[in-house]
Each structure stands twice: as C-alpha cells, then as structure tokens.
Amino acid sequence: MDVASIILIAIVILALIVVKMTIVIIPQSETKIIERLGRYHATLKPGINIIIPFVDRAKEFVTMVAGRYVYTTDIDLREQVYDFDKQNVITKDNVQTQINALLYFQIVDPFKAVYEINNLPNAIEKLTQTTLRNIIGELELDETLTSRDTINTKLRAVLDDATNKWGIKVNRVELQDIQPPQSVLQAMEKQMQAERNKRATILTSEGQKAAAILQSEGQKEARINQAEADRQTEILRAEGEAQARIRRAEAEAKAIEVVTEAVGKSTNPANYLLAQKYITMLEEVASGDRTKTVFLPFEASNLLGSIGGIRELFNAPEPPVK
C-alpha cells in the first residue's frame, strides 16, 4: 500500500468522523443544549440536527439515575419521578416523625434547567425537604396523619412556585409513608381501642335505652288496651245486667198482671207473690242441714195471712157470668 492510499483512507475516516460529529439525531421527548465557543447557541429538536464539529458542543446536564447523580448531555422532557429518602420532621406538638415523599415533575424549559441551577435533582430534593418540614411543623400529629391531601396540595403549590425559574413544572407530590415513633404508635393504638370501647359502650347503652323505651311503650299500650277492654267489658256487663233486670221486671209485672186477672180485685196479688216467696224459702231451709236451728222473722204472721187469703181465694165462689 502506497502513501496515496494511506492518505485517502485517512481522509475518508476523518470525513466519516466529521460527518458523525456534524449530524446529531435526537430521540422524541429528548433534547440537547448546544454551546458554540462556550456560549449558548441552540436547543436541538427531535430528529436530525446539524452542528459544527469542534466548535459546537453539547452542554452537560446533571440528572439522577438509580439514586445517583449522573452527568449527561441528554435532557429528558418526559414526566419524571424522584423518590426521596426518609427524613425526620417535627410536628407542632413536638412529635418526631419520619416521612418520605414522591415528587412528579417535568422539564418544560431546558435552557433554565441547565443554566439557572447547578444541580437540579439536588436542588429539588433539598427544597422538598425544607418545605415539607415547614408544612409539617404547622400541623399536629393527628392532623398530619389525616390531612395528606392538604399537605400534598400545599407542598405542590410551594414547589411549583419555587421551581418555576428552574424551568420545571411540579405536577404532584405524594407522601409515601408517615412513621411516628413506636411509643406514639402504641399510645395511638391504646387511644383507638379506648375510643372503640367508648363507642361500643355508648351504642350498647343507647340500644338498651331504646329497648327499655320500646318495652315501656309496649307495656303502656298493653295496659291502655287492657283498661279499654275492661271498660268495654264492664259497660257490656252493666248493659246486660240492666237488660236482664228490665226483662225480669217486665216478667214480674206480667206475672202480677196474670195473677191479678186470676185472683180478681178482691184479693191483693202482692200477698200471693209474697207467700210464694216464703214457700220457696221454706223449701230451701227444709232441704238444708237439719242440725241447724232456723229462726223465722216476726213478719212470718204475714205469711199465714197470705196463706189464709189464698185459701179463701180457692174457696171463693165464681163470679157471675154477664
């Protein structure tokens, strides 16, 4: 191989190197910052871009990969997530708590992300930690555990405003875990158990109270119904007795009327009925215990008079037929 061939091969290789350094292919959702002689020149767009070799060069950018800071010339424009390590924060009621957060952000201005901040991932992490400490310091432990959405909203608003000049947009912030001290967890568990026991006791007492009220109301209704039934029974019984007395009186009146027609006006029918009552009584006395002494009242002489009147009734002549 002669010298001319060697020179030709060297020229071809050098041309390929120059072409390779001149043509820069940028993938979608990525970009590069190009400096010309140390000054900002252009922000490359996705696709094929032409630069001047040895004059233009890509600016290095600090990013975080697998928890480590890495220098690269490729700037990712997609949404990224940073998972920060746990940090100790103190609440308003002086309880030390460990909290770690997730930060979702996106580079919207590569120029600012490269030239306005030296180490963007470290700056975001430190800003998130200090902001989170300030927000948690204004809340008590119970509020911290129950107000995650409020904390996330406040933290996102502060970070979005502070990182605006860095050319990034904070989309959302999530508190991944909140770990109070073990002693506080035990106290919270006891408090929760006591609160549950309290609610159980309250519910039991309210149930017993409601049951007692329903039972008393039931007894009240039962007594009212029983009293109403007794009243209706007494009314019906009284009405029945009244009707029975009326019927008996009507029957006795009818009997007196019949007796009066039978014995005539010359004999008093009352004496007849009275004598009949005495005879019935004497039959009952005679059929009773014979070892007992029976005392007849003084008015028994009226019975004899009534009996004599009856005897005269049956011996009296018949009235003439008209």
Image (tube, rainbow, N blue to C red):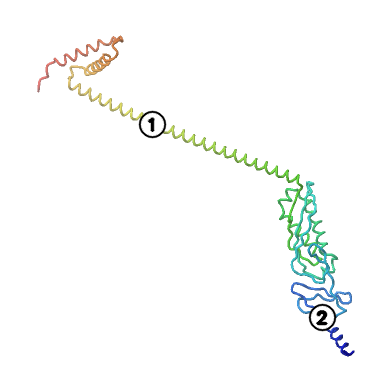
281 horizontally vs 178: left or right: left
Residue 20: mark: 2
- At a point 84% along the width and 64% down the height, the residue shown is 119
Vertical side of 83 occupied by 233: above or below = above
Vertical side of 111 occupied by 14: above or below = below
| Of residues 299 and 13, the one drawn nearer to the viewer in this rendering | 13
Secondary structure of the residue carrying tag 1 is: helix
Vertical side of 253 occupied by 186: above or below = below
Amino acid type at image mark 2: Lys
- At a point 60% along the width and 41% down the height, the residue shown is 203
Residue extending furthest front? 1
Q: Are marks 1 and 2 in contact (CB under 8 Å)?
A: no
Q: Label 1 belongs to which residue?
A: 233
Q: Residues within 10 Å of mark 2 (few under 14, many from 20)?
A: few
As measured in the structure, the alpha-carbon distance from the residue carrying label 1 to the one carrying label 2 is: 118 Å
Q: In the picture, residue 25 is in which quadrant?
A: bottom right
151 horizontally vs 306: left or right: right
In the rendering, at what x and y percent does residue 320 appear?
10, 20
Amino acid type at image mark 1: Thr
